[in-house]
Every structure is written in C-alpha cells, then in structure tokens.
Image: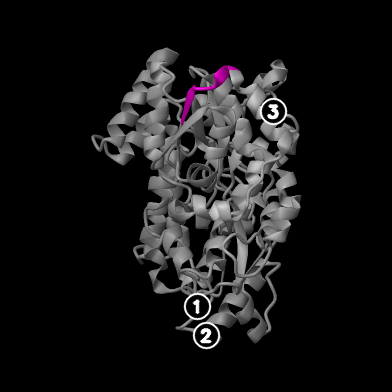
Amino acid sequence: MNPVDRKLWLASLTDRFARGQMDRRSFLRSAAKLGLGAGALGAYSHLSARSGLGLISPARAQEQNIEWPEDMTNWLKEAAKPFAGQTIRLATESTPPSNAINSALKGYFTETTGINVEIETLPLEQVLQKLTLDVASGLGTYDLYYLDQSWMAAFSGDVVDPREKYESNADLAMPNYNIDDFLPALVDGISMYDGVMVGVPYDIPIFIQMYRRDLYEELGLKPATTMAEYLSNAQTIMKAKAPEIYGTTGQMKSGHYSLECDWTCWLWAHGGSIFGPDGKFTGNDEAGIEAMNYWIELKKNMPDAVTSWTWDGQGQSVAQGIAGQLISWGEFFPSWDSPNGSNVAGLMEATVPPKANSLRAVDETGYGEIPGVGHQGGSSLAVSRYSKSPDAAWLFAQWATAPETQVWITVLGGGTGPTRSSVYDDPRVKANAKVGIPGTTRHLDAVRETIANHMGSEPDLPEWTEISNDIIPVELGRFWAGEYDDPKTVMDTIKQSVDNLLAS
C-alpha cells in the first residue's frame, strides 16, 4: 500500500471508530497494521480527569494583573503584520496548557498579532480522527497538530521540523525562544522521531510521590526513599487510620489503560521490563513476579473500590481525604491544594518517587522501552505541512510554548508540568510555592527532578496499542477479580497473548 492510500485508509478507520461504527479492538488492530504509533489511543486521554484542569476564567486571569514583556509584544506585533486577519486552527485533547490558553490567555495573542485562534478541545479519539482526516486529504483544515507521543511515528512526515522553521527564517524566530531550554529528556522522549523533531514539547504528565504531611508527622513517617519504605509507610497508615484513611490508593480499573500505568511503575521499580532485547514479553520473569507480589501487598492497604477507579477516582480519593500517600500523576497536586472541593488543602506534600530496587538498562529491554518509576506521558505542538497559514501557526506555537506563556499557565493554576527548564526557575513560579492556593507550584521541584532522574517510558511499537489497552489491563483486571490463582499464571497468560500477537 503506497503512503497516500495508507493515510486514506487510516483516516477511514479513525472516522469509523470515532463515529461508533467500529469496535475498539478492531480499530486498534487495524491501526497498528498501518503503523500508528505506540499508544495510539493509549489512554484515550492520558488523564481523563484533566478536563477540569487548567480551566481558568478570564476574570481570574485579570485579577493576576498579567503583564507581557514589552520586547515580546513588540516582536509579535511586527512579525505578525503580514498575517493579520488570518485564522489558525488547532484540535487538541483537554490538557492543562490547551485549557488555560483557550480559556484565559489566547486573547492577548490575538489582540497583539491580529491573528485569530480557534481551539477545539476534544476527546483524544476525536483529535486523532481530525488529524488523520486532515493529513489524508492534505486540505490543511488544521494549522497546528496536538501530537500525543505515541503518534510521532505515524505523522512525522506530515509536520514541519521546528528547527528548520526556526533556523531558516530569522524574521519568524521569536527572540529568546531558545529551543535548548526545553528539558532534554522531554525533547528526546516526546518530540523526536528518527532524527525528526516533530514539534515542541507541550505537556508532560508524570508519576511523582505525594503524601499527607499531617499523617506523616503524627505517625513519625518520612518520605520513602525505597520501595520497601513506601510499602511500610502504607502499612503504618493503614494500621493506625483505616477505615477512615487508607495507606494508599490506586487506578486499577479492569481493562483500562490506567491499570497498565500502575503496573509499569511497580514492574520497573523491581528491576523488570515489559520486553527483552529479543522482542519477547518479560513481565513474567523473576523481577516481574517480584513486582506482582509487592503490588499484592500494597493493595491490601487500598480501598476496595480501587479496582473500579481510573486516575479520576484515584485523584478524588485523595481530595476526599481517604488516602495517605500515592505515586501517581503530579498534575493533580494543585487541585488538591485548592480550598474549593478538596479536604486536604495545604496538607499534601510532593517528592520524587522512591528509588527502584534495581533498573534494567535500556539495552536489556525492547522497542525503546526506558524503565523508570516515574511513568510519563506527554505531547508536542506541531505545525502541519498542509497548513494554509504555516507562518502564523509557527508564531502561535512559539508563543504558546514560550517561557512567559508557560509561566502564566503554571502560576494561574493550570496544573501543568512545565516543559522548559527556565520556567521551573522563574521567580513567579517559585513565589507560588505556597500552601493552600489553587495555583500552587509546591510540587514542581519533584516533577523536574523526576523528569531528569526517574522518568520511565513505554515501548514504541505499533502493537503496543492493543497490548497496553486490551491485553495487559484486561488480564490484570481478571487477576484482581480473583480469576487467577497466582501472579505467575496471569503473567504467563499475558506473555502468551503478547508473543502470539507479535508473531502473527
């Protein structure tokens, strides 16, 4: 099948799926055969509860007395003169940066440049539908693409490498934009594919360790630096406080990607990996079984309802005050610190994940898997090769990911993890590291260090979509429902299914 036909067929599949005319498993299998990248709809949304994050009212933004740098404003006015009156369009998942920009910040860009911006915030499968239809037709309906990290392989040829755009036209290069300011681990992990920079790092949800300070002080606990300490802390909280407060919590709904996310954290933390260098599933080896046994003990300290929760239920359990600690998405932290709708405002603390018992080296894994306790997901913002207004789109992409814009997304309470080093060091961001405010940044030191030293990334292969959504979480769900007698049996079953799929 030639590239054009491949795109048209992928667009047709995605359209049928988004319209409910094709079941999920059939879509995942067909899309994998057409080369759609590692996660495709890996989570449908990396964090479905994120729809409530980053929704900042214009009134609240006005209260902050936002002032944009004069040199930034002057440059945007001058650079945008040839494009005034143009409209650029972006279809995006509901992420903190997109929500904050759309709800409170994009007015500045339009007022300054005269460029109109239309942002469609959609479920992830509909974002993929819009993207595939656009690249298949080449019509350029959308000027900017929100690219989940798992889509890079499929769409790397349909976007403009920002380094080429930035370096080839000085008139369109925002002063002090500095691509090198993006955290190197994120550039490598979510924006590069086969030597092509598909976009600029836009968003980075990642697992960090979070805990109730009041409980730790009362019970004489310290943040865990090892996996054994983390389990011990959970057991101590459970013994002293259950059933009002449990030792920890989870996102363990059967058949849901969130269950797979939790599993990878414990697997990597115990020296395991999903694949070996021969491309075979290795979750059933000695390290994999050790991880399962650890998880079994840890679950004894969770509410029974965790097997019905995705990340949304997990996050709410903390907000309701019924969980003492967890290792999960750092993006939730600001919402917990808000006095509105949280029973733990000002009580949560954040730090890096406990050190892994051992870590399997990348060359001991398969398909580019990178073991690390800090499971990550991320996205890039890319300019479409089919855009009718690519220069205007590039101006917006630079502004949307510029240090100044990231600072305001962060301090207004968007819940995002910044992708730039300088934003973590910005005095305004550091000044918001206060207890009990909606836009707290108290957790960001932990996020930054986790990205640098503890980040884990899933393997990159087309079949990973089906493996991570339909095989691993389905069989793990059966295990937690009591349908397997022991962890070795469930892991052996997963291995057989995965290896058979990859051999077919």
- Marks 3 and 1, the one that precedes in the sequence: 3
Q: Is residue 162 magenta?
A: no
Q: Nearer the viewer, residue 24 or 337?
A: 337
Q: State the residue at coordinates (72%, 19%).
A: 170
- Amino acid found under the numbered disc labelled 1: Tyr
The residue that disc 3 covers is 75
Q: Quadrant of residue 348?
A: bottom right
Q: Which secondary structure, mark 2?
A: helix
Q: Is residue 233 above or below residue 280?
A: below
Secondary structure type for disc 1: loop
Q: Which residue is mark 2?
A: 241
Location of residue 160 by image quarter: top right
N-terminal of the pair, mark 1 or mark 2, is 2
Query: How far, Cα to Cα, is label 1 from label 2?
Result: 7 Å
Q: Where are the magenta residues, as a range? A: 82-89
Task: Categorize mark 3 by other alpha carbons within 10 Å: few (<14), some (14-19), many (20+).
Answer: some
Specify whether residue 54 is in view.
no
> Are discs 1 and 2 less than 8 Å apart at CB?
yes
